[in-house]
Amino acid sequence: MFTQYVANEQFNLQINRFLNDFYQEDERANSDLQGIIPRLKDMNSWYESWLEYAVMREERQDYDLASVYYQAAEFYLNPSNPAKENMYQKYRETFYKGFHDFDYKSYQIPYEHSYLPAIKLVTPGAKQTLLVFGGYDSYMEEMVKMMNFIKRINYHIIVFDGPGQGTALKNGLKFIHNWEKPLAAVIDYFKIDRVSILGASWGGYLAMRAAAFEKRIDKVIAFNIFYSGLDALKIRMPEDVWNKLSTLLDANEADQVNAMIENMMKDSIDLSWKVIKGMENTGEKTPFAMLKNFEKHTMAGIGSFINQDVLLLAGENDQYVPISRLPQIQNELCNAASITTKVFTKETGGEQHCQAGHRNLAFNEMIKFLQE
């Protein structure tokens, strides 16, 4: 269930994302939230509150909860803050201490000057393979945890961090739009003939992009739909502000774009996080350069190349992706072998981004799609 904990909508989304789908009935988590929620006022109090409880849970050897809290503590930290790397490492360390849901093997897939970290979740007797990845800010371990929702399917599941994600990013691989490249590296490494893919959040776009140009893919899951990287910035801006910004962007007025974004960041935790995280992911040094980079992340012009079976999941109240993109995506997938669509509403549950608070509903649709 999606719960309104505080007034800040992104704080709410992150709390639901990190906790509600796994710990809704957990007495430990519910007790901790009573102490954490009243303290969440800004980015600093967010960090301090989650960290305090992460340390406490780790000391009690509640590694599963400690991992969640360390991930939350890391979330809003600036990359220049030395604590960010420490929080990430504590998140991963406690995650693996507390993860016992699957038998798994870890891999380092050679890629450019570095490697892509991957985990293969082994399903005894499985004949098929599902490749799973996140998007803008999710880590491989977060996606691994979600696989509990589809544990019973007849697939081996390979979860990996691509360029700009998790350990791949930490090792210098920056975010890219042409996702067929890292996906092909994973497929080649495991010597797979046919795969299905699941991309979460921004990964909804990355999955579409990969499917357009990598034909060893047979089924594509967009969890959720994601048409354009710029949508995630545009959706919470007043129309006149966005129109001004996009005009300046089109005219390559870098100084004016930078000044405009930096001024808006002062009053918006959401925008501040998006821009800081975006520059970390891409390696760009200014908001203008980051936005120009994001312009490459679009389904425009590639929909007709996608000829696989496609599952489109969408939340009516998604705070990053406008639901109005859905008919456009459906129309542009003119050569898809099939299109299955599920829209989640407040009445059905799952109306938020990636069905936060109701993940089971999304994964039930994926199970049906994969087993058809």
Image (spheres, grey):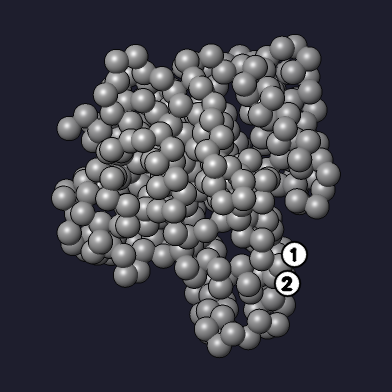
Towards the viewer: 360 or 284: 284
> Callout 2, which amino acid?
Asn
Q: So how many labels did they put on this image?
A: 2
Q: Residues under labels 2 and 1: Cα distance? A: 6 Å
- What residue is pinned by disc 2? 263
Q: Whole-percent x and y of residue 334?
A: 18, 62
State yes or no: discs 2 and 1 in contact (Cβ < 8 Å). yes
Towards the viewer: 318 or 296: 296
Q: Give me the residue at 66% from left, 70% from top.
A: 287
Label 1: which secondary element: loop
Q: For the residue carrying disc 2, how many other residues have a C-alpha within 10 Å: few (<14), some (14-19), or many (20+)?
A: few
- What residue is pinned by disc 1? 266
Rendered-image quadrant of the C terminus: top left
Q: Give me the residue at 36% from left, 63% from top.
A: 299
Q: Which mark is residue 80?
A: none
Q: Whole-percent x and y of residue 92?
A: 66, 29
Q: Whole-percent x and y of residue 43?
A: 75, 47
Q: Is residue 325 left or right of residue 273?
A: left
> Callout 1, which amino acid?
Lys
Towards the viewer: 60 or 235: 60
Q: Is residue 239 left or right of residue 165?
A: left
Q: Whole-percent x and y of residue 108?
A: 56, 35
